[in-house]
Image (cartoon, rainbow, N blue to C red):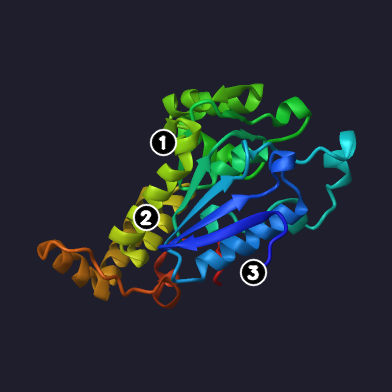
Amino acid sequence: MDYEAISVVLDEGVATVTLNRPERMNAWNGPMAADLSRALTWADTTDDVRAVVVTGAGRAFCAGADLGDGGGTFRDNRNQDPFEAITEVFPWNIRKPVIAAINGAAVGIGATFAMTADIRYAADDAKIGFVFVRRGQLPETASHAVLPRIVGMSRAAELLFTGKIISGSEAAAIGLVSEALPGAQVLERAQNTAREIAIHSAPLAVAVSKRLLWESITSSIPELLVSEAGLFRYIADQPDSVEGVESFLERRDPTWKGSVNEAFPDGLFSSSQLGGTHD
């Protein structure tokens, strides 16, 4: 596919999606939102994609909304189609693991979008901030639900209410990201994790586990127990359940056969509030 504001490369089961407006520090705009929705939908529905890495071109991950329209940026855009203002498809919507490689500044939606990824790595000197209130605006992208589950209520309140900037190292210390590394190593670290998933983890089992993980935000423990029990039995009947054990006993890499597109068991989940790209 042709993209205006991102680039996509698929290699060894890993799709690397690069926000590609380096001259604007990858500032968020309508074309970028549309491109990301299309790219994530493609990754979700393509069995050759086992994991996704999202990063930024140049020195930033994403410097937030493009403020090129001045003071009316948010007011002038409030009646836009949601697809133009923000992506319709976020990392949590898709069934493949998504890893954010925060190579530089991640501010505003650059920070909240990264929070919708499953795993995050950051440059130790990256500037990360939920700066919305400092621009007179409200944090979005379900950050009021997601951020407290990542760092706890008190730290989430501090980050959202002050809009202060923290470094990648500080983000790692409070669990906002999994690890902070020198900037030149961030993308490689994310891609190595993605390849580890692509090779060693059964795609269907990972997809089901991811959905359960995100549904835990809105589901009770009893609901999850019911879902897990039925899904465990379903996965046990899939060929990869046999292949996983046999490859372990034979000390070889597994050859996974399960198709997320063909065998994902939507009907066995207790809720479907997250939606998806494949319905």
Tell me the amino acid under the disc marked 2.
Arg
Q: In which quarter of the image is residue 166?
A: top right
Residue at figure coordinates x 43%, y 44% from the top left = 188
Q: Looking at the image, which is closer to me, 171 or 102? A: 102
Label number found at residue 236: none
Q: Looking at the image, which is closer to me, 187 or 107? A: 187
Disc nearest the viewer among 2 and 1: 2
Residue tagged 3: 1
Is there any visible trace of residue 76 in the rendered image? Answer: yes
| Cα gap from disc 2 to disc 3, whole angstroms | 23 Å
Q: Residues within 10 Å of mark 2 (few under 14, many from 20)?
A: many
Tell me the amino acid under the disc marked 3.
Met
Asked whether, in this view, residue 79 is left or right of residue 122, the answer is right
Residue sticking out furthest to the bottom: 262
* Label 2 residue SS: helix
Q: In which quarter of the image is residue 35?
A: bottom right
Q: How crowded is mark 3: few (under 14 residues within 10 Å), some or many (20 or more)?
A: few
Residue tagged 1: 178
Q: Position of residue 155 (x, y in %)?
A: 52, 24
